[in-house]
Each structure stands twice: as structure tokens, then as C-alpha cells.
Amino acid sequence: MFFGSVFFVFLVLIGIAAIRFVRVVDQYERGIVLTLGKYSNTLDPGLNFIIPVLQRLIKVDIRITTVDIPQQEVITQDNVPVGINAVVYFHVERVEDAVLKIQNYSYAVSQYAQAALRDVIGGVELDSLLAERLKISEEIKKLVDEETNAWGINVTSIKIQDIELPADMKRAMAKQAEAERERRAAIIRANGELEASKNLQSAADNLAKSGAISLRTLQTIEGTTANPANTVVFALPVEVLEGFKRLIGK
């Protein structure tokens, strides 16, 4: 009985030791092993073994991470205050550098992205900011990626989400857009009237050449005399009056 109890305790101790020796690294992770505080190797996904007490395992997630940049109050190059927020997408490429060279890489990426956003936005005018959002986002990404590359981080994308403008600036832009729409409408109306006048002139020329202008005049007179109460005033062409003058002169 005594030996059975001892054997059972021995098995329990072996099981506990085996559990402490065995470490499982998931597919989306990598493991950094520190032996007596010094980096020794990187563990791949699967079943791994470490020496308890002497070694310590630090797991690092290598999936793409999303970090929000809270709204930043920035003054553009043409002195317009705007509020901008963005999102940073990045992932760990070299887990050793991400653990050994930077204390908290997620926080560091967020802070550096905020600083880069302020620097880039402060160097562009408002019109460029509104019209070239993708280009500006790419410039911010390039700055952040160059700095974080030394930390083993790869910034895949930075997206500007919202651009908050002052209320008076919004009203001014709305008036400008309305004036632009009115200008385009006036141009369209003018082009339509010009085209209509050209068509009328062409029709008048064709009627005059074919002699159908007289027939058109008679049709008009017939239409106006249908009601006896109407008074019709005839305006003779100048050519007719000149002909009368020549006859009288003779």
C-alpha cells in the first residue's frame, strides 16, 4: 500500500513536470525563448519543449493588428484647423526584434503614427487634403514604415477615416458648391439657346430660299383671323415698300 501511494505521487510529479516542459505554440503565433534572460531561439507553431526555471517562453501574435489613431487637431498649411482620425494596419515580421528592441510595439506604432500624421497634414493645404486623401495616407504610411522596420514591424496600410472641418468652413464650401452648380446650369442654358437660335436661323434661310415663307405667312394670317374679334396688323417687308416707291416714281 505504501509503495502504491509513493508510485502514484511519483506519477503526479512526472505529469506536472511534463506539463511545465511542454509548450504549444499556435499557428498564428511564434515563441521567443529566453534562457537565463538571454535570447536563445524562436519556436515555430506546434508542440515544443522548454526547461522550466532556466527558460521562459514569450508568445508573439503575427496576425495583422489594427490600431486606431484618435482624432488629432491639426492646422493645415493654409491655416485651417481640422480634426482627423485614422487606422493603422500592421503585423510582426521579426518576432525577435519586436520583443527585444521595443517594449510595447503596438503602443509605439500608434504614437509614431500620430506624430507622422501631424507632420504630413501640417504640410498640405485643405484642398489637397480633401482631394488627395489616398496619396496623403500613403505618405504617412511610408514615414511610419521606415521607422518601425527596425522594430521588426511591417505597416501594411494607414487609412484616414474622418476629416472634421469647422462649421463656418462647411458653410463656405456649401455656398461655393451651390455657386458652381448655378454656373454650370447657366452655361448649359446658354448653350441650349445658342443651338436653338442656330436651328431657327437655318429654318428661316431654308424657307426664304424655297419661297415657303409666303405660305407660312398665309397660314399664320388664317390662324389669327379665325376669331372676328381679333385685329390683325400687317407689317410689310422693307423690300415691298421699296417696290411701291419705284412704281410710284415711274
Image (tube, rainbow, N blue to C red):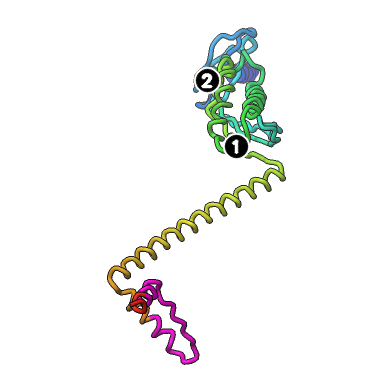
User: In the rendering, which numbered label is found on residue 158?
Assistant: none
Residue at horizontal 63 percent and vertical 21 percent from the top = 105
Tag 1's secondary structure? Answer: helix
The location of residue 222, given as percent across then percent down, is 39, 85
The location of residue 153, given as percent across then percent down, is 56, 21
- Compare residues 68 and 22 and report the one nearer the observer: 68
Instruction: Report the quarter where the C terminus lies.
Output: bottom left
Q: Is label 1 or label 2 in front?
A: 1
Instruction: Report the quarter where the N terminus lies.
Output: top right
User: In the rendering, which numbered label is found on residue 127?
Assistant: 1
**Corner quadrant of residue 197:** bottom left
Is 222 part of what is drawn in magenta?
Answer: yes
Residue at horizontal 41 percent and vertical 84 percent from the top = 223
Marks 1 and 2 sit apart, C-alpha to C-alpha, by 37 Å
Q: Amino acid at mark 1?
A: Asp
Q: Is disc 1 surrounded by few (<14), some (14 to 19) or many (20+) residues within 10 Å?
A: few
Q: Is disc 2 surrounded by few (<14), some (14 to 19) or many (20+) residues within 10 Å?
A: some
The location of residue 176, given as percent across then percent down, is 62, 47
Task: Read off the residue under disc 2.
Answer: 93
> Which contiguous range is marked in magenta?
220-245
**Corner quadrant of residue 57:** top right
Is 176 part of what is drawn in magenta?
Answer: no
The location of residue 35, given as percent across then percent down, is 61, 8
